[in-house]
């Protein structure tokens, strides 16, 4: 039996990597090119870096506020969804509730409809229902965290349930025999074993909230406006600031890369945890 040439496999993955990473490289080229040169065809090989776009973005207090809003909303939503998703999965896995499969399916239905369907109901909830005096949840960080929970919490439950189901119930029973309380069983037995799945759920829900555009553009004005929605401000009737838009796009990639690098070792383990039983 002939062995495959390793150079062919290496060349194949090099080509796949080039196709995948070239748009990101081209984005950086546009962000580091003066505006006048963008009207002609930019060189594929970047000969000199034009840092003024990055300086302008960092010196813009409005964009810094948008970036802070994105970080707070994404991180808050990821923590809330992962926490409540974990407790929901523990309840669905450990307790014999009637119709729990129907409950699990019902939570997933929120992910089946397009987000645009929920725009009007969410707007009315934020402006009319959840209203205390003159205070409303519209254009607030707390309101956007709750809005993203509508879509990310069902995803967190769907992602974490195989992880919790993969932990044998005998471990819970052994802890109860040793005198552990239900809270200690959850925090000291089940939670440590679920860390890979929790890491994957945390990063995915964080990325979903960080990249979301439609809901943030509709339900925020200024106070809770996110960085992704700030891109639209540079498309005007007088022209489009392609360099600034590309620079903002580069800044949206950096936090995601940092978060991925932190939890990278948990991602593969979390995706496969609970896939095989017995």
Image (tube, rainbow, N blue to C red):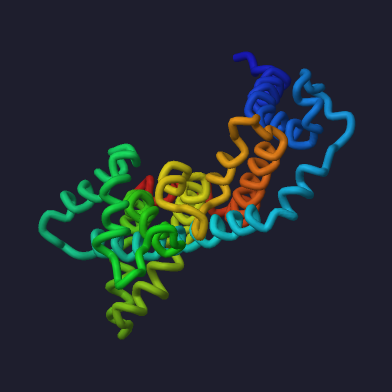
Residue furthest out toward the right: 48
Total numbered labels placed on residues in the image: 0
Q: Residue at x 12, y 54 (%)?
A: 99
Q: Compared with residue 186, is residue 58 higher up or lower down, i.e. above or below? A: above
Residue 160 visible in rendering: no
* Relative image position of residue 81 (x, y in whole percent): 39, 59
Closest to the observer, 146 or 96: 146
* Relative image position of residue 40 (x, y in whole percent): 78, 19
* Relative image position of residue 256 (x, y in whole percent): 60, 49
- Left or right for 4, reference 169: right
Q: Compared with residue 121, is residue 25 higher up or lower down, i.e. above or below? A: above
Residue furthest out toward the left: 98
Residue furthest out toward the front: 238
* Relative image position of residue 21 (x, y in whole percent): 67, 31
Q: Residue at x 68, y 32 (%)?
A: 242
- Left or right for 20, reference 29: left
- Left or right for 267, reference 145: right
Choose top left, top right, bottom left or bottom right for residue 36.
top right
Residue furthest out toward the top: 2
Q: Compared with residue 160, is residue 9 higher up or lower down, i.e. above or below? A: above
Residue 222 visible in rendering: yes
Q: Residue at x 56, y 58 (%)?
A: 71
Closest to the observer, 268 or 230: 230
- Left or right for 82, reference 52: left
Q: Residue at x 79, y 36 (%)?
A: 32
**The N terminus: image quadrant:** top right
């Amino acid at each position: 039996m002939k062995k495959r040439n390793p150079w062919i496999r290496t060349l194949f993955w090099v080509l796949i990597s080039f196709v995948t990473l070239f748009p990101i490289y081209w984005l950086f080229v546009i962000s580091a090119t003066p505006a006048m040169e963008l009207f002609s065809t930019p060189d594929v090989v970047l000969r000199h870096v034009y840092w003024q776009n990055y300086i302008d973005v960092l010196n813009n207090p409005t964009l810094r506020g948008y970036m802070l809003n994105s970080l707070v909303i994404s991180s808050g939503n990821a923590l809330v969804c992962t926490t409540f998703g974990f407790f929901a999965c523990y309840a669905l896995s450990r307790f014999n509730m009637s119709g729990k499969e129907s409950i699990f399916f019902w939570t997933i239905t929120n992910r089946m409809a397009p987000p645009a369907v929920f725009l009007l109901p969410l707007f009315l909830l934020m402006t009319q229902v959840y209203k205390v005096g003159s205070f409303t949840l519209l254009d607030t960080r707390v309101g956007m965290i709750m809005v993203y929970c509508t879509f990310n919490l069902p995803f967190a439950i769907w992602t974490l349930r195989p992880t919790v189901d993969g932990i044998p119930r005998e471990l819970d029973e052994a802890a109860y025999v040793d005198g552990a309380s239900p809270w200690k069983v959850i925090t000291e037995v089940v939670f440590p074993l679920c860390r890979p799945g929790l890491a994957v759920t945390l990063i995915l829900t964080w990325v979903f909230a960080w990249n979301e555009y439609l809901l943030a553009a509709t339900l925020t004005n200024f106070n809770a406006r996110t960085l992704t929605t700030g891109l639209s401000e540079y498309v005007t009737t007088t022209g489009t600031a392609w360099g600034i838009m590309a620079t903002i796009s580069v800044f949206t990639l950096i936090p995601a890369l940092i978060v991925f690098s932190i939890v990278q070792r948990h991602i593969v383990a979390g995706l496969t945890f609970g896939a095989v039983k017995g």
